[in-house]
Amino acid sequence: MTDNISRESIPADPTERMNWFFNRVTKELKIWLLVDEHGSVLLTADDEDCVPVWPTQSCAEQWATEEWEGFTTEAISVSKWKSRWTMGLEEDDLSVIVFPDQQGEGIVLYPEEFEFELTKRESKRR
């Protein structure tokens, strides 16, 4: 992996991984997605259709295999996320799965919950 992150340093626990995600994202101010010409990858978790998000490009790239081979990574700035993505996901009735592991396990948040966590943690960084 690039980004100076080893697989061993990534927490296995979904809640710890979510905290790690928000710490990294509020520092770098980027959220990483996997996309193709049709849009973002979608996962189904807890009976919710979810957009998976990752804290780094290399973490997202690990998912661009098998059924998602051909998808590319895309960075979304935190400000763009707040101005467009939260509302767009709500309108499309989609949730966010935060930093899923290789088995697709992660914390599922509604878009407004995700933005609330982003904003709360950003204010702690200041």
Image (spheres, rainbow, N blue to C red):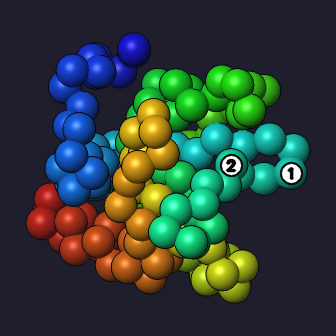
Compared to residue 70, the image places residue 43 above or below, namely below
Residue in the picture at 24% in, 32% down: 10
Determine the residue located farthest toward the right in the rendered image: 37
Three-letter code for the amino acid on which mark 2 is drawn: Val
Q: Which of 55 and 98 is in front in this view?
A: 98
Q: Is 2 above or below relative to 61? A: above
Answer with the quarter of the image where residue 36 lies: top right
Q: Quick one: label 1, few (<14), some, or many (20+) residues within 10 Å?
A: few
Residue 45 image point, x, y percent: 52, 62
Q: Which residue is drawn at 29% across and 71% down?
A: 117
- Residue 47: x and y in percent read 56, 72
Residue 102, x across and y down, in percent: 45, 34
Which residue position holds label 2? Answer: 41
Residue with the mark numbered 1:
38
- Whether residue 27 appears in this view of the structure is no
For residue 57, above or below residue 31: above
Residue at screen point 72% across, 43% down: 35
